[in-house]
Image (cartoon, rainbow, N blue to C red):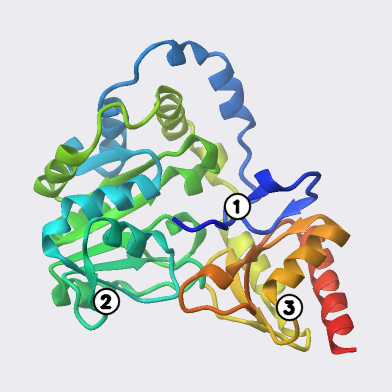
């Protein structure tokens, strides 16, 4: 695991706006917090060994079998669990830049990287940090080229593009799908994710999963969120994507800033004068804004940074701040 993932707000005081986190700024968790405050007694007891009640609830939502669902302590827990369960495959492939934990997890369990045809192919879709979305046809082609295709759909609720459904994945037999309730409901501190895959695959993963892996408060939150999800999912995804396009165009108008195409609420950018680290420090010091220095993604350079769309007023202020920084760098 690398140091310097986004949302490292624990290192900074008095932030005004966090552009480093890809979680939608429009999600309101007040009702959830109020509910959990009246159910804190769950922390006095061990949680379910395998989060069975939440797996059943997720299966009900997708109309699949509970045997085709495994709840994990966040999507990252699922990544390492899958790498452990498939370690006999020995080789992996991943296209960069992307989330670093796929390669880290594979290396931990002794895989060798085989870029042109690894047995286990990892894909973040939508991709972090670029916001690129692969089509369903592309995913089906990839599934035929590799023994296993692992699709991390953590950002599936951050795009208007069509995603593979769990039912479709289960029918494909060699595809494993990762989901993130963290991203969907804006609860990164609770660490809650799940895997959907054919029952024999889930059984293999479960054999490697430690008991009580998901804490009781997270399970309680997950059950409540799925029963009360409407207030959380009416955050006008289309409007957020529209605001992202507007922000991207505003940034593109700044000389020295390049913005990569995106289909999500976050975007990868690069700066021609100075570095992402310098820009990050400038924004922190002068505006108390936090962006993601993306230079530690394999395949990216010191000039790359990632930002996620926030409320329009903050977005406009960020554009002006970046413009001022570039003017200073360009003399």
Q: Work out whether residue 96 or residue 221 is closer to the camera in this orientation and state it.
A: 96
Q: Give the SS element for disc 1.
A: loop
Work out whether 30 lies above or below 114: above
Dot label at residue 137: 2
Seen at 9% across and 47% down, the residue is 200
Quadrant (top left/top right/bottom left/bottom right) for the N terminus: bottom left
Q: Work out whether residue 194 or residue 63 is closer to the camera in this orientation and state it.
A: 194
Mark 1, residue position: 24
Distance from label 3 to label 2 (Cα)? 32 Å
Dot label at residue 167: none
Dot label at residue 251: 3
Quadrant (top left/top right/bottom left/bottom right) for the C terminus: bottom right
Seen at 57% across and 46% down, the residue is 234
| Upstream in sequence: badge 2 or badge 1 | 1
**Coordinates of residue 194 in the picture (x, y in percent):** 32, 43
**Coordinates of residue 167 in the picture (x, y in percent):** 21, 53
**Coordinates of residue 285 in the picture (x, y in percent):** 84, 59
Task: Judge from the rendering whether residue 237 lies leftward or rightward of residue 68; answer left or right.
Answer: right
Circle 3 packing at 10 Å, graded few (<14), some (14-19), many (20+), is many
Distance from label 2 to label 1 (Cα)? 28 Å
Work out whether 284 lies above or below 144: above
């Amino acid at each position: 695991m690398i140091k310097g993932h986004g949302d490292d707000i624990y290192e900074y005081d008095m932030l005004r706006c966090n552009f480093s986190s890809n979680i939608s700024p429009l999600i309101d968790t007040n009702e959830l917090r109020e509910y959990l405050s009246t159910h804190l007694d769950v922390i006095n007891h061990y949680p379910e060994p395998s989060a069975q009640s939440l797996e059943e609830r997720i299966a009900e939502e997708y109309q699949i079998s509970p045997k085709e669902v495994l709840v994990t302590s966040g999507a990252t827990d699922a990544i390492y669990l899958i790498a452990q369960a498939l370690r006999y495959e020995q080789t992996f492939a991943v296209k960069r830049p992307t989330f670093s934990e796929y390669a880290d997890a594979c290396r931990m369990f002794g895989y060798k990287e085989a870029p042109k045809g690894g047995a286990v192919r990892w894909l973040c879709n939508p991709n972090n940090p670029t916001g690129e979305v692969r089509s369903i046809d592309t995913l089906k082609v990839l599934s035929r080229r590799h023994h296993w295709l692992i699709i991390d759909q953590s950002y599936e609720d951050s795009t208007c593009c069509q995603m593979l459904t769990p039912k479709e994945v289960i029918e494909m037999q060699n595809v494993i799908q990762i989901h993130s309730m963290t991203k969907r409901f804006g609860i990164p501190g609770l660490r809650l994710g799940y895997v959907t895959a054919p029952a024999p695959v889930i059984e293999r993963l479960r054999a490697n999963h430690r008991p009580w892996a998901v804490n009781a408060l997270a399970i309680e939150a997950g059950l409540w969120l799925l029963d009360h999800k409407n207030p959380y999912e009416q955050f006008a995804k289309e409007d957020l994507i529209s605001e992202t396009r507007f922000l991207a165009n505003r940034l593109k108008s700044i000389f020295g800033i390049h913005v990569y195409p995106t289909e999500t609420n976050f975007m990868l950018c690069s700066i021609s004068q100075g570095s992402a680290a310098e820009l990050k420090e400038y924004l922190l010091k002068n505006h108390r804004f936090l962006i993601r220095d993306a230079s530690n993604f394999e395949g990216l350079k010191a000039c790359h940074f990632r930002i996620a769309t926030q409320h329009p007023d903050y977005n406009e202020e960020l554009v002006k701040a970046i413009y001022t920084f570039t003017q200073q760098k360009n003399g």
